[in-house]
Image (cartoon, rainbow, N blue to C red):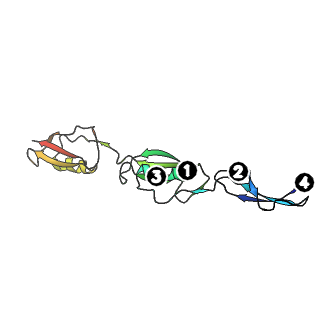
Amino acid sequence: AELTLGQVVPQADEAVPAEFVIGVTTTATELPRGEAVDLVVSTGPAPRVVPVGLELQPLPTALDTLTGLRLVPTPFEEFSPDVPAGAVIRLEPAPGTELPADSPVTVVVSKGPEPKPFPPIIGLSVDQAERRLAELGVTISTVTGPPNGQVTGSSILAGELVLPGTTVALTTR
């Protein structure tokens, strides 16, 4: 065409891969021989920003939002005493971070509180057992036998996994 290369104008484009020509800046259909033509060249898709506000949202909401932004969410579960099971604890990288399209984002989702083993309480006084159980968030629902007696049995066996909020019935003598 006997034209020369003018300026290269970078422009983000969702469909045209980086370094491919999107078009020219002139609308003229004829140009004089040797004229410089400015090219618009794709820089690829525009950067994405990890969204704010997905913490404490249900996992499906976070996955849909990130996928809609052309980010690639990867769920990872961990226990949390404060965030309900199935809700987002945090995103990695953090919200507000700018990333290229199709970048991975780890979505850390809560498995709820971590179950802990029920402690041995046989032989303890009811008061001692109550203090030990309170450390796990377990409460005594009923005491069959003397309320100030020694624990001889419980509705949960030592070593069984329990969650905070669990209740236990005790037997004393």
The secondary element bearing badge 3 is classed as helix
Q: Earlier in the sequence, mark 1 or mark 3?
A: 3
Mark 4 burial class by Cα count in 10 Å: few <14, some 14-19, many 20+: few
Q: Earlier in the sequence, mark 2 or mark 4?
A: 4
Residue at 8% x, 46% y: name it: 146
Q: In the current view of this chain or complex, which residue is farthest to the front?
A: 29
Name the one closer to the observer, 71 or 137: 71
Residue where numbered disc 4 is placed:
2
Q: Earlier in the sequence, mark 3 or mark 4?
A: 4
Q: Which amino acid is tagged 1?
A: Leu
Q: Which circle marks residue 71 in the picture?
A: 1
Residue 97 falls in which quadrant of the image? bottom right
The x and y percentages for residue 63 are: 47, 49
Residue where numbered disc 2 is placed:
18
The secondary element bearing badge 2 is classed as loop
Name the one closer to the observer, 100 or 6: 6
